[in-house]
Image: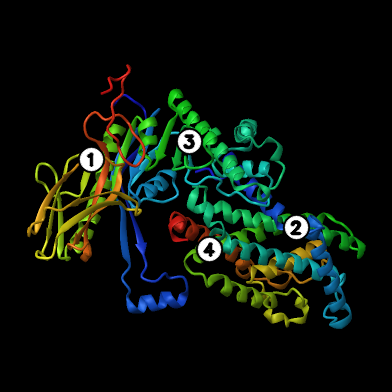
Amino acid sequence: MRYMTTKNRAILREMVVTDFKVRYQGSILGYLWSLLKPLFLFAILYIVFTYIIPLGKDIEHYPVYLLTGIVLWNFFTEATMQGASSVVARGDLIRKVSIPRYLVVITSTLSALINLGLSLIVVIIFALFNGVMPSLEWLMMIPIILELILLATGISFLLSALYVKFRDITYMWEIFLQAGFYATPIIYPLTKVPEQFHKWFFINPMAQIIQDARYAMVTPTTATLWTSVHNIAVMAAPFVVVVAIFITGALYFKRHSAYFAEDI
Amino acid sequence: MADKEIAVSVKDIHKEFILPQSKNSTFKQTVVNIVKKNNKVTQKTLDGVSFDIHKGDFFGIVGRNGSGKSTLLKLIAGVYTPTAGSIEVHGGLTPFIELGVGFNPELSGRDNVYLNGALLGFTREQMTDMYDEIVDFAELGPFMDQKLKNYSSGMQVRLAFSIAIKAKNDVLIFDEVLAVGDEAFQRKCLDVFEGYKASGQTVILVSHDMDTVRQFCNRAVLINDGKNIMIGDPRKIAKKYSELNQGVIDAESSKKNERASDNSISIKIFTDEGKERASFRAGEEMLASLNWDKVSEVDHVVLNIYKQSGEHITGFRYANIDNKSSVWVSMRPNVMPGRYHIALQLFTVDNSQIGDEGAIEFNVKNEYVGDVDEWSGLVYVSHAWAEHKPEFK
């Protein structure tokens, strides 16, 4: 079975472009908001965490460090929230044409990915302003983001298929995300956490992804999975979690997608 | 027939829908339903439908509302998954279950054409090839860069239908889409259908407009209660279909008439063969027996015929009652097809009405007695054409 046929690519392209065109309809600044949003977020975080709660005063380029974490977490939130409601939101299509159902989930991931790309441009600009030197290690971001996409898509598959039958899912996921925001070292550096707990933090793939991204982009001094954990089994944990979530999600989605048209 | 290539093969299709007692949309309801062991009710919408559509067929799917024809269409289009049975489609298939699927009011007309095209299974290159023709057909050239929300509803429909009509694929499916646009646009669409027919395009048309089915289809299937009861010649199918509808109308009329007969006046209508019946052909002889029980006071009776909409068609009076309690009347209602009722009123010598009127319903079918030419209007007036000046008295 071929997944990315020219027909499917045409559908994806049209749906993603539509999403993007419609998003800022009626606003004067339009697409500029995609850049302005992370910019202002950055300004606020900078003021709060440099002058009011200086959590990361020991960390090199802390504002960029913080922004990297926030931007990746925002992608995760956006992709999974949009993904979870994607099938139901596109119910009109699903009831009337037989387009492959997984395309609507991929569309929401790709839409979020466009935003992540724009946000990363802002991150890079600030990194340079902040005196971070560009290096080959920045290329590490490619596999890191691929892992993040795999995780977000897997969760979206699972949640969107569940959401067709149980409309409570998105509320539960929202709460889960709130908790996850604090369970993941995003606003606080991992160094504030006693070292014996680090390995537990890294079972969470988001912690591993964000710390690796900071290592690649901002400062090689940050604690990562590779520097904190020395047990191979524990080292594999976040990747096993990502792959397991993706397979579970994709299989569950595939099994139920044949009946989406009548269940929505 | 056997040597013709098959385009779509529907084999013993069954489709059941689960109707939850109360929909399990939240965990609480799910838990409640599991605890109470609510039995889910399944509804058999299709119960063993089979037929083959050959390449080049203009194939009609007809049936009354709720017969399962739209479900069948969605199964062929791949939107639903059958409970049992299989559907094989040879070649590409483009379904038009609804026009303008995915249309977004915030996008320009042009963007919507590409979006809709992609959702119907066309690549961007294919859409670019078809684009000019679509715009020409819709007569919307100057508006394509405007947002769809600034289009009138008629323009939106025209754009959507033009995409449908210009789409090229091995099999095209249309679901009752002819009822859009003004007369001139409909004419254009019918021309396109003629074109399909002439060029041997395989088309599946779902409709309950028998005229369209008769005009275009070379084969058809009649679906009733989830079963195919007839496959073949569209003219025979159309006839069977009107019989099915007539059966339902008759059942309703006789139910109403039963209720009405509690009155002290009773009316029964018969054919000239003495069969009690509620439906007649236009101009067919109808014999009515009129009975009442207030014998002594009745001086004369008046019989009126009304259309269901309330228009008074005709009325006549009979005065030779002479203490009788029943009388017969023979009529030939030369009126347009539709529902009517006969009402009988009883009067005393001084012209005051006795009790309520009695009434009975009857239907005039879309069929004529004898070699009557086509006529229109409320009633048929007997007439004779002449080429020469008639002889006057």
Residue topped by disc 3: B92
Mark 1 belongs to which amino acid? Arg
> Mark 2 falls within which chain?
A
Q: Do dots 4 and 3 share one subunit?
A: no
Q: Secondary structure at mark 4?
A: helix
Q: Does residue B117 appear anywhere in the picture?
A: no
Q: Is residue B70 left or right of residue A254?
A: left
Task: Give the residue type that dot 4 points to.
Answer: Leu
Foreground tag (2 vs 1): 1
Mark in front: 4 vs 2 = 2
The label shown at residue A158 is 4
Report the chain holding disc 1. Answer: B
Amino acid beneath label 2: Gly
- Name the residue located 62 percent from the left edge and 66 percent from the top edge: A81
Which label sits on residue B281?
A: 1
**What residue is pinned by disc 2?**
A26
- Can you give x and y, in whole percent of width and height, for residue B140 in the image? 65, 37
